[in-house]
Amino acid sequence: MSNRIPDEKVELIRRSSDIVEIISDYVQLKKQGRQYIGLCPFHGEKSPSFSVSPDKQLYHCFGCGAGGNVFSFLMELEGLSFIESVRKLGERANIALPEATDQERVVEGPQSLMRSAHELAAKLYYHVLTLTEQGSEGREYVKERGFTREQINHFQIGFAPDRWDSLVTILTKRNFSLDTMVQASLLGERESKDGYYDRFRNRLMFPIWDGQGNVIAFGGRTISDEKPKYLNSSDSPIFHKGNTLYGLHLARPSIRKQGSVVLFEGYVDVIAAWGAGLSNTIATLGTALTEEQAKVIRRNAEMVTICYDSDKAGTNAAFRSAGILEQVGCTVKVAQMPEGLDPDDYIRTYGSERFRSDVIGESLTLMSFKMRYLRKGKNMQNEAERMSYIEDVLTEIATLPRAVERDHYLRQIAEEFSISLEALKQEQLQIYRTKRNQEQNQYSSKEKPTQTRKSTFETKKLLPAHQNAERFLLAHMMRDVEVAELVQERIGGEFHIDEHQALAAHLFAYFGEGHEASPSQFIQGLQDEKLIRIATELAMMPVNEDYQEKELLDYMNLIETYPKRVQIQQKELEMKRERDPIEAARLLMEINRMKQELH
């Protein structure tokens, strides 16, 4: 806990921040009873095991064990410090906080400075494009490209002046560390090491945001013949191309409303599509789609339409991307662009309505796209190439999960090539069995991939009675100060699991300071990551809200008598090993006496 932000301010921000609303910016949540569930953002999964409780203001993943409150969520997912998470949520809740000191920025590292500098640069570039003489060439260019004022405003498009020191001068006046700005990819350092220069010059500037709308990088498009045509920020501590999707925070409301997303290759296509009336659009940043980006997409939508360029490179990229999206659980369609046109070109040539109806509206199912893709370059009049194509298609059909889909595409092949449907079904089944056997053989000599995380994700084993008793008792203690007082009076900290003993001690101290029962607030005060995860899991456990005192006493009795039960078990083992019948009889009498004492 920082002494720079008063505890009461931190608590006010926590109470003012709805955890369901905050996490919904990152994960598509669906209501299920009193909880909300979704795909965990901390590990890859296809079935939701991530649960959010609006009542307790906590989250917990029953797969990987991640858990905590709204502050820990931002800290773990975005890599923020506690103070940064408090400030971010305070700003969102319009709660005024003391200005961050220079010392505080230093303590929190360079990332906060980098984000502030990017916000400042975005405002500078937008101001230059829209209001200054230096931006006149940029304004001419956007006019030629057909960008409207609405597109410029919505995407905060700007212009970097044709000068070496525009940004350097402003950042210097604001006391930013220029070395840090080089790391942030905003500036470059001269080879002679005697100064710095603006990395972006004489370019139309497109801010690149993270998923929550913070500017973290830029894309610069030259307005002359300068190479490269597009210049993106390099990876930095706050920006990783392989994790970032352009326009996600702008598109998220529409993605959630429509339940689908359109994926492009670049930001210009997103801007053009938005102008054409498509607001659920995002893009990669000129690089191949990564698995991490695919997981982010899946957490926000299940249906994805890929709309890449129509050239060979674009088609190959669509095929690769479709496979990655399919692996993370997305339902994929692929839009077909006319030869020689990219989405931006198409919209400017044929208009918005035709793009929406003839391109996006006529998107192919993934299997139909694969069939076209596999057919390219093959001569269907050549028997060998025709048979090769059919085998490739059957291999893809064998991966389809639904029998009705497999039957549909097998009938297409049968009709087109006049082949017996039964023969095709037998061949497809043989391919499926061969592939399954290969996978089984592949894993027979080594651990299966899922086993590498067995300790984390395996189904929890049935716990001993005393351990379950401790868990339920702690769960009740977090919810009710009177239960905590009863436990403290009778058994104190005599829990047998080390982590449970530590949590009990923290709870006694927490209530001793006069706090009311609040699992979220209690967990916020914990420092140990393992304790946070256990406490969150216990807080999210379903417990009997209308419990009787006898239930609590039974739990405490199990805990108190556990050492005696262990002694009895040891005596019983000793008796089984004893060969002297007199000594065995003595042990039996002792065991019976100990059992009577238990009752």
Image (tube, grey):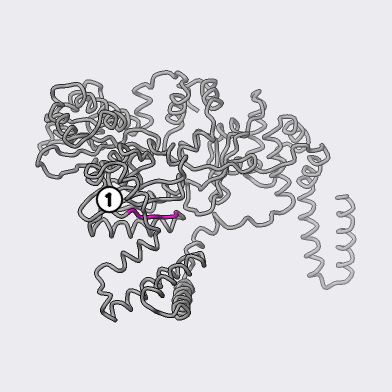
* Residue 201 seen in this snapshot: no
- Does 179 sit left or right of 86 as displayed? left
Q: Nearer the viewer, residue 269 or 597?
A: 269
588 over 518 or under it: above or below: below
112 over 585 or under it: above or below: above
Residue at 32% x, 65% y: name it. Answer: 372
> x and y percent of residue 148 in the render?
25, 31
| Quarter of image, res 155 | top left
Residue at 89% x, 63% y: name it. Answer: 586
| Quarter of image, res 14 | top right
Residue at 28% x, 30% y: name it. Answer: 156
Disc 1 marks which amino acid?
Answer: Thr
Q: Which residues are magenta?
A: 331-335
> x and y percent of residue 269 in the render?
27, 43
Task: Determine if the magenta segment contains residue 332.
Answer: yes
| Disc 1 element | loop
Tell me which secondary structure the magenta stretch mostly adopts.
strand
Give the class, few, some or many, for how many residues have Cα within 10 Å of label 1's Cα (few <14, many ≥20).
Answer: few
| Quarter of image, res 128 | top left
The residue labelled by disc 1 is 287
174 over 188 or under it: above or below: above
- Does 321 sit left or right of 169 as displayed? right
Q: Nearer the viewer, residue 116 or 514?
A: 116
> x and y percent of residue 386 in the render?
31, 77
